[in-house]
Amino acid sequence: MIEILNPGEVSRARRTGALVAEILRAMRDRAEVGTNLLDIDRWTREMIADAGAESCYVDYAPPFGRGPFGHYICTSVNDAVLHGLPHDYALADGDLLSLDLAVLKDGIAADSAISFVVGKARSGADTAMIAATREALAAGIAAARPGARIGDLSHAIGTVLEKAGYEVNTEFGGHGIGSTMHQDPHVSNIGKPGRGYKLRPGLLLALEPWVMADTAKLVTDADGWTLRSATGSRTAHSEHTIAITDDGAEILTLPN
Ligand code: MG
């Protein structure tokens, strides 16, 4: 199902998006050398509750995971890239941490992800990889306007990632979002211009380029959720929720 939101619903989406951005910013500020992933999960739970919002993750049980996720934020470290299950791990200097958060407030969801290095970066390759996912996200957003097609966004995203030297995985990508976290249309991180669903004002999309340094192949961790690079290489992920407006796209998950 593809949902088109009315202006009142888009206003509510703005508020949910601002909350997601605020929580991610707070977690980024609090994630230091020695911080435990379970603390990040607990702080996120507290901020969601204080805002009168709900987690999209706690009871989430899609076909690709093992039962309900049971946590409030995805914490993917180093070779983990997607759906990182928070666990008892204290962050070390130079760890590359990706946080992915989706929240539902007043009936509308928003979804965003950031990657950053904790403490001092071990290598310029980490910062370059994070920058590539951010640039790809910006390119996808720049291509989003009424009349554009999903393939235009996928092409814009994939072109940046491939030019930066990464192989693009097509199993997981962006998605429609609205009254629930994951909806149609799927937004692959690689694609052909002019193909796919035509964008309309009121459509909300979560765009989320992600890469692994030297492979496109994922393996699932023994925890049944966390997806890691098959080679053990490091990874990065950037995501925003955007609303298609009359003349372009508005990013809903920017920090204030
Ligand atoms: Mg998403």
Image: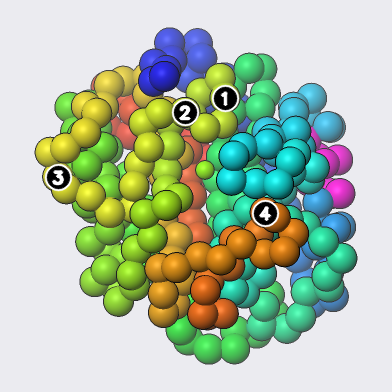
Which residue appears farthest toward the bottom when viewing the image? 123
Which of the two discs, 4 and 3, sits closer to the camera?
A: 4
Name the disc covering residue 193, or none: 3
Name the disc covering residue 180, or none: 1
Residue range (magenta): 42-48
Which x, y percent locates residue 95?
67, 78
Amino acid type assigned to the residue bearing label 3 in the image:
Pro
Q: To which residue does mark 4 refer?
A: 225
Instruction: Tell me if 145 is positioned left or right of 14 in this view.
Output: left
- Give the main secondary structure, helix, strand or loop, of the magenta stretch: helix
Mark closer to the chain start, 4 or 3: 3
Number of labelled discs? 4
What secondary structure is marked by label 3?
A: loop
Mark closer to the chain start, 4 or 2: 2
Instruction: Tell me if 221 is positioned left or right of 187 in this view.
Output: right
Amino acid type assigned to the residue bearing label 4 in the image:
Trp
Amino acid type assigned to the residue bearing label 2 in the image:
Gln
Instruction: Tell me if 44 is positioned left or right of 121 in this view.
Output: right
Mark closer to the chain start, 2 or 3: 2
